[in-house]
Image (cartoon, rainbow, N blue to C red):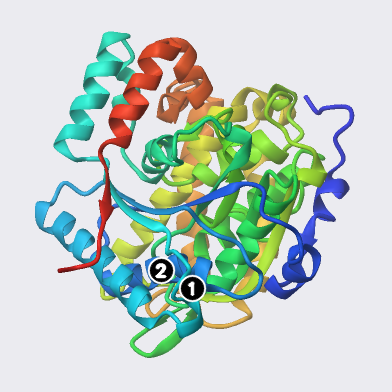
Amino acid sequence: MINSKYNVKDWEKRYLQSPEEVFEVYGDREQTRSLSIIIPTINRKEQGTLQRTVEKALEINLSDYPKIDASEVIVSNQTKNKRTVSEYKSTLALAYEAVNDDRPADKEHVWIPKTYHFHLEGKRVQEILNDYLNKKNLRKYLEVEHGKGENMYWASLVSGNGDNRGDDKEVILFWDDDHRTVSTKHMQALALPAVTDDILFVKAAFQRHHYEDGERYQGGRVNATVGRPKVKLLNRYGLMPDLRYPLTGEVCLNKELLKKLNFASRYGIEILTLLQTVSGFENFDKTRIKPENFLEVHIGKDFDEAHRHGKRSEKILDGLKSMGEQITVNLFGAVGNELTGLFGNDPERFMKELKEFNREVSYRWAHRGKIAANFELDELNSNMLGGVGNVVHDYFGGKNKFDYRKEFLPSMNTLEEEMGSGDFNDMMYALKGEKKQIFLPL
């Protein structure tokens, strides 16, 4: 089950504790790969936070140190609401205008990355996907559960300039759209090692918080109650490094590596990415990278939006529970057979050990501050572990052993093989034509 050469300690050493440490190590190196920044979003109602995120991405080229350039910033959304689509475009135009107007006098000659809006649920995009996938009897890839992972998948396909540089010369930085304290420095810290060195995968770690009614609360609830406990459980068996913040949307990957990976279609794509790239499971020998090609970077405190602000506690807990269930579905969809063998086909044993790490991680996390305005840690833990337990017992009982993989999208390389290079490339270039550039407002 475990690759004989796998050593979790090799991965745990691959950690830098601040952006400044990244700049010290990599700041003087020349950029040798192009950089695309993708901001996936589904139905962002708070346009101000999205605008700030886009502005910070566009300002990468204007920074003095370290000096790296992004070729494009893509905001990819899945909303079906036409009014929201119009708001997105206006937000991107305003962000572009603000950065252009505020650029320092000595940066007048510096070009700002091209800004694009990609509407995954747009009529023409869906027509293209339907036409090409139906042609090859691959419509099943359009019938996955819609979510963030699906958004990232198709946005990745349209990223880049489409020239002959090769995927190994392209890097994609993914950044979530809910960071109130995002800075260009944070983005640079993740992108710099990947565009200047042979680092194939950089992921962020941080201390997450948010505000509700002016009070500061602990963020990262799903990480603390489900994400890190699962990673620590796998770490106990030598199958995964003890990563500091496993479930983060802020990652930077070499596109050649990205095209080898399966994608989870909804929330929790992060656990599937980690399993394929840095875990010791034998079935990922072809996608696992070397420790020297991986880096985890702590970027400090992060304040995100309280998405469920103002909702009843039951509604909030239901949403968190759903996230925990999706992560578990992805875990068992990827390595379920291995886990049932490891735990002697005993779901109670798996849950007992998971609860042990849940207590260890979540109570330490909760001691840093308040976790919510309207529920306590024990209530959160009971809710999250109950959802996880439902999935675990279903899988160990054989009810959903094969269904879980239906939420996975194939690697882009696999999709190309299934479609044939000609049709795949034609579809890709047709989709790139729907990546609409945003210009300065008139």
Secondary element under disc 1, as helix, strand or loop, is loop
Q: Residue at x 44, y 40 (%)?
A: 161
Look at label 1 and name its amino acid. Answer: Val
**Res 182 label:** 1
- The answer to whether residue 260 is visible is yes
- The answer to whether residue 345 is visible is no
Q: Which residue is drawn at 68% across and 49% down?
A: 231
Pointer 2 or 1: first along the chain: 2
In the rendered image, the quadrant that contains the C terminus is bottom left
Q: In this view, does 433 lie to the left or right of 354?
A: left
Asked if residue 331 is positioned above or below residue 220 in the image, the reply reads above
Measured as percent of width and height from the top left, residue 293 is found at: 76, 44
Q: Are marks 2 and 1 in contact (CB under 8 Å)?
A: yes
Q: Residue at x 23, y 33 (%)?
A: 125
- Report how far apart the C-alphas of labels 2 and 1 lie in the structure: 6 Å
In the foreground, 316 or 100: 100
Q: In this view, does 52 lie to the left or right of 270?
A: left
Q: Please, which residue is most extreme toward the front here?
A: 109
Near mark 1 (Cα within 10 A), the count class, few <14, some 14-19 or many ≥20, is many
**Res 53 label:** 2
